[in-house]
Image: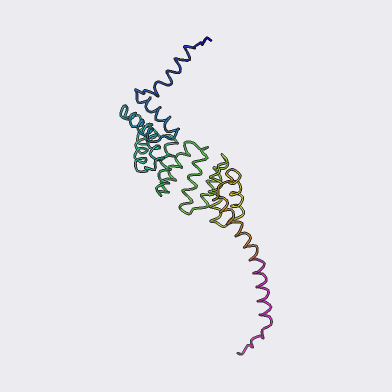
Amino acid sequence: MQFFIDVDEVRVYLRTVMPLAEPKTAKEFNNRGLRHYRQERYDDAARDFATALRFDPKLTVAAAYRGMAFFEKKDYATALADLNEALQGDCKEDWVYKGRGRVYLATGKYNEAIADFTEALRRRPDAASVYNYRGVSHARLKRHAEAIADYTRALEREPLTAAHYNRGVSLTRLGRRQEAIADFTAALQADPNNVSYYDWRAENFLKVRLARLVIPVGGLVGRVLKMQKGSRPKKSRDQ
């Protein structure tokens, strides 16, 4: 049996793999860090991004990526410092503003989150997930009408299950239960095992059915009271 090796393919493979196995430059460490990040190895990713910055402190994209790695590790203070460093430099892309907005959202700084999500959308108006995050920020401030508008914008761009669920919650808060039921139903079609979706939909079903019972009972009580009032003797004018 004979084997044939394509030398050109080997060269391409080595050019691709060797920088990941033995990075030597800031860019190579940054690229390996990205691979770690995408495979959810956030500690390894953060170390490689840090090494990239030691090689080249002006590589602010590495600071942004490291910030996102720390965000995933729930080290929000370090994440915010890294993302601020990136934005103070020349890394002002939409995903960096989105990332910092998520840090602000996670730490309860909702107005700051809204500002960053708005800036991200200014740079990339079709970003459905950013509309969803901005909607969550509005909802945390109990601005449910604004939240619903953002969830709707998200769904106009992409059928995000989270946006259906979040819009359903805000619709529930405003008492718009039939619309909320429709959103929770849509969310369940995408994720039929999510208990929370069933709970929210059941709550709305229950309130709608109770309201249908209360209306006729209320009408009956009103008629009875009216009859009772009509049977009472009228007061004389001089009493």
Q: Is residue 180 above or below residue 211?
A: above
Q: Is residue 159 above or below residue 61?
A: below
Q: Position of residue 102 (x, y in %)?
A: 43, 43
Q: In the figure, is residue 193 to the left or right of 37?
A: right
The answer to whether 181 is drawn above or below residue 154 in the figure is: below
What stretch of residues is rendered in magenta? 215-239
The percent position of residue 48, horizontal first and vertical second, equals: 36, 30
Pick the residue in front: 164 or 35: 35
Residue 164 position within the rendered picture, expressed as x and y whole percent measured from the top left: 56, 46
Which image quadrant is residue 52 in?
top left
Viewed as shown, does residue 50 lie left or right of 130? left
119 or 31, nearer to the observer: 31
Q: Does the magenta stretch mainly form a helix, a strand or a loop?
A: helix
Instruction: Give the residue displayed 49% in from the left and 36% down from the top.
Output: 124
Check the picture and name the quadrant holding the C terminus: bottom right
Here the colouring is rainbow
Residue at the far front: name it.
Answer: 1
Count up the numbered dots: 0
